[in-house]
Amino acid sequence: MATVNGYQGNTPVAAPAGTTPSKQTVPAARTVDTQSVLKRLQSELMALMMSGESGISAFPEGDNIFCWKGTIAGSKDTVFEGTEYKLSLSFPNDYPFKPPKVKFETSCFHPNVDVYGNICLDILQDKWSSAYDVRTILISIQSLLGEPNISSPLNTQAAQLWSNQEEYRKMVEKLYKPPSAA
Amino acid sequence: MVSDSINASIPSVPKDFGKKKRANRSAKLKQCKLDARREQWLSQGAVKSKGCREELMGPRGLPQQIHEEGRKDPLENLQMRRLGRRVGEDENENGSIHHDFDSDSPSNSPTGSSVLGGNDSGTNFTASISGSSTSGSSVGCCSGCITEEDEEGDDNCLDDWEAMADALAANDDDNKLENHNDDNNPCLELQSSLEHESIVQLDGNLGSYHENLTEDRSVPPRVTPGNSRAWRPDDALRPQSLPNLSKQHSFPNTDRHYGQGVLAWGCVSGVNVPSACPICTEDLDFTDASFRPCSCGFQVCLFCHKKMLELDGRCPNCRELYKNDPVEVEASVLGGSLTLKLARSCSMRS
């Protein structure tokens, strides 16, 4: 239980933007929430470890279960084949009602990933659903690698180069730094 | 009442088990003597007390009440029973050690001795027990009539089986320590006591236990007449309040190997384990399990549903707006989506 309190202290309290009318009920529910977030994350971790999903993995960083490190492997038959990317996932206190903050730790040359590793993916923003979990997030990002959304790029250079897959592949190889080196 | 004396006398047994680890021979003999007397007394008094208690509480109250007794100290009960059986075996196999016994006392002489007469093999003993219970079951009336009460008893049995499994596991050490005094093979000895206790425990109450004991003994007289001192199923003097013997035999017959039975039942009971809320992973209780907030069939617990109404009010699975209770649906029809949201947030606060 001590760790629970520790997590509460460590994790930034998400501003309840849409719930201002019922603000007075929020503080009372907060401690209960943290418990259920813990439970949910623990069960996700368990499920992820049991599933043995190939190409993706995730594990809490240190002993803080609200911060995970994940890896995804570039899918076969894409320009990202043979590469591996490290990501960080930071879960809010009201997860899974709010999405985790997911960033690339390894630099990734991709139309929807900026130089800081921020990802433009609808399910991580407005299309988030509490039914998603770490596994579906990582799978979505993995498929995003091979199927970028060119219409709203964060990396315009990558978006322009996407049409030329051979050149793109060369660029990926040139800019790729394995996660261990990053 | 006998039931009081049972509870009162039981605590002495586990203490004695502790002492036995120090191999206190004289203490053991003394205890054996005590237990033998107690068992004799119980088997005499139990039938009476059974009748009285059943009259007092009614057939339905009885299993529950006894069940609680079993909960209180299942281990001690088991130890007492086990010990009682072992006393019989000791007398049977190395009677020279336990001179204290009144060898004529029917309650002290186990089923096996009357059937097989001074056998010194655990295997034979086991066989005699199972044989007696089997023959008892063939004697034991019509087993086809399973009443509702029987099923209720079954439920109690399930709990008691688990308690017994725990108690047996805890007992195994003691049991092995014990066995150096007996010439018995530990496994066989254990098996025999399991075999016996499986019949005992299935009934889930002490009363039936005693009846089981008496019933066990009611079988050998068919082989060696003159040893009978308990009611037979067809005994004219047998009180009406005694439960139907078929009740007991409907069980051991189907689950003679109790270890497998426990596993199988564990699985059966596992079927009813409720699924968890996919959002918070908490188990769905009965209300949650019957709560279907969305036409897509995606189930969430009430707590998470309330949470989602506070946020975007959409089903996490299909993203459709949750339809609320009829009042709010009316509001949405009248005033559109904006009114719907207001109505919803109002309902949240109230």
Image: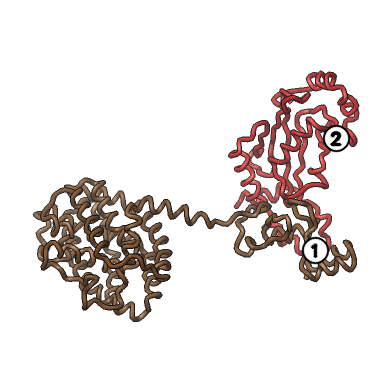
Chain colours: A red, B brown
Query: Does label 2 or label 1 sit earlier along the sequence?
Result: 1
Please indicate whether residue A114 sits to the left or right of residue B79 in the image: right
User: For mark 1, does the 10 Å Cα neighbourhood hold few (<14), some (14 to 19), or many (20 or more) residues?
Assistant: some
- Callout 1 secondary element: helix
Q: Position of residue A176 (x, y in %)?
A: 77, 22
Mark number, residue A22: 1
Instruction: Look at 16% across and 62% down and name the residue there.
Output: B220
* Residue nearest the observer in this picture, B42 or B133: B133
Q: Distance of mark 2 from mark 1, alpha carbons?
A: 37 Å
Q: Given the image, on which type of amino acid does mark 1 rest? A: Ser
Query: What is the total number of numbered labels drawn onto the structure image?
Result: 2
What's the residue at 30%, 68% (across, down)? B208
Horizontal and vertical percent position of residue A172: 80, 22
- Subunit of label 2: A
On what subunit does the disc labeled 1 rest?
A
- Residue B27 location, x and y as percent? 18, 58
Toward which corner of the image does residue B113 lie, by quadrant? bottom left
Which one is nearer the viewer's eye here, B38 or A151? A151
Residue B327 in the image, given as x and y percentages of width and height: 80, 71
Q: Which residue is mark 2?
A: A149
Using the image as rendered, state which of residue A156 and residue B289 is in the foreground. Answer: B289
Q: Residue at x 35, y 60 (%)?
A: B251
Cβ atoms under marks 2 and 1 closer than 8 Å = no
Name the kind of residue labelled 2 in the image.
Answer: Asn
Q: Residue furthest bottom?
A: B56
Q: Quadrant of residue A74?
A: top right
Can residue B311 be seen in the rendering of this structure?
no
In the displayed structure, would residue A134 be above or below residue B62?
above
* Residue B198 at least partly seen: yes
**B171 with respect to A117 (left or right):** left
Between label 2 and label 1, give the one nearer the viewer.
2
